[in-house]
Amino acid sequence: MDVAALTRDLVSIPSHDDETAAGDFIEDWLRAETDADVTRDTVGNVIARYGEADTLALVGHHDVVPPDESQTDGDEYVIETTENRLYGRGAADMKGAVAAAMLAFRDTPEDGLVFASFVGEELGGIGARHAIDEGFAPDFAVVGEGSTGYATAGVTDVVVAHKGRRASTVTAHGTAVHASEPESGENAVYRACDAVDLIRDIDPPSATVLDERVSGSLAVTGIEGGSAWNVVPESCAITVDERTVPGERAPLGTVEDIEGVEWEIDQDLPPMACDDEAFAETVRTVADECQDGDPELVTKPAATDGGWLAAADVTCVVCGPSELGEAHTKDESVSLAALDRCYRIYAEIVDAVGEN
């Protein structure tokens, strides 16, 4: 079975509401195709390993975001294969990389090699966090999220850092009164606007990882308040999207210096930074040998399970077939050439890490 065929099999299995069937397929395939120790934990993660020591892990996830109507036919996912690409929900994010990692894991049965496909990545890293809590801590990890076309179109690069995401809500409280006498109350919308002005003046932090610059961002993405046109509002909430960088966060807590304003973190997906330049260069060298282009060490704008692993002191890079702009789209697809390339990269990384 080649990587395109295995990707097609994986993509055909719906896994946006329930990852069980996709996990079953991966588990059964690994048991049939390898002599590895294959386990399925209580949340549904599939983890396989050769030997006792966890030296290098090939990491992915088999859940996907809900499909567009055009990507389903009843209860089945619609898949289309052209000469160069495979289309379907999860092809890019990230069942193609999972398939490439499964085949590389089968074909390079070295002691210390681990394969892991997690659940719940799209819901905040549920599977990765559970695995880490249960002791999953390889020395090195290659996370198969997208890194193709970041520096040069058609070239699979190596991500050494990515942003995290901190989502939060700022709530302003006031005193409701009739709008004909606004001076007798406290307008929560005005207080919320003061908080917006403060947030707008915050300079998001930046960081440098292995000479690559990662810049954070900060944006107010929603505002809601008020109950009627003739009532001064007693409450107003704003939502804030912060893209975080390794080592520093924007001082959003300063909004609580405004009277009647409180700040609450709703989600905090950690950023990733590779802490071992030699490992990053090893992976880049392997990627260079497996393709005609010149891969570079790059940064990625979106969070991955690599953030949770890096926070647990696992040395990580991200390297995968998906290109920018493919994930979560109604015409999501993956390059067949990139799938083959990533299979070779993953297999060669096993040998390269073993030599070092």
Image: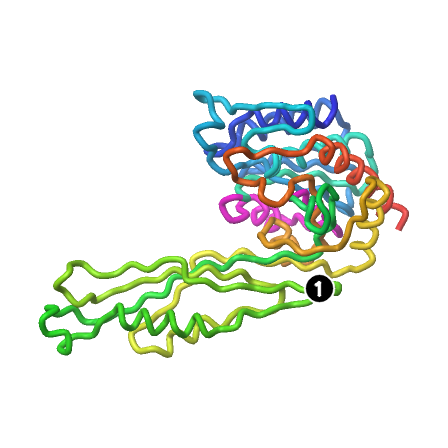
Q: Is residue 67 left or right of residue 98?
A: left
Q: Is residue 66 left or right of residue 260?
A: right
Q: Is residue 144 magenta?
A: yes
User: In the image, what residue occupies the spot 73% across and 61% down?
Assistant: 275
Residue 230 x, y percent position in the rendering:
12, 63
Q: Nearer the viewer, residue 155 or 284?
A: 155
User: In the image, what residue occupies the spot 35% across and 70% down?
Assistant: 262
Q: Residue furthest right?
A: 355
Q: Is residue 94 above or below residue 298?
A: above
The stretch of residues the image draws in magenta is: 122-145
Q: Nearer the viewer, residue 156 or 240?
A: 156
Q: Is residue 28 above or below residue 208?
A: above
**Residue 93 appearing in the image:** yes
Q: Residue furthest front?
A: 153
User: In the image, what residue occupies the spot 58% across and 52% down?
Assistant: 302
Residue 338 x, y percent position in the rendering:
72, 36
- Image quadrant of residue 312? bottom right
**Quarter of the figure that contains the N terminus:** top right
**Residue 312 appearing in the image:** no
Q: How many marks?
A: 1
Q: Is residue 233 left or right of residue 162?
A: left
User: In the image, what residue occupies the spot 30% across and 68% down?
Assistant: 172
Q: Is residue 300 left or right of residue 193?
A: right
Q: Is residue 256 above or below residue 62?
A: below
Residue 160 x, y percent position in the rendering:
71, 56
Q: Amino acid at mark 1?
A: Val
Q: Which residue is mark 1?
A: 209
Q: Nearer the viewer, residue 116 or 231?
A: 231
Residue 97 x, y percent position in the rendering:
67, 37
Q: Is residue 338 magenta?
A: no
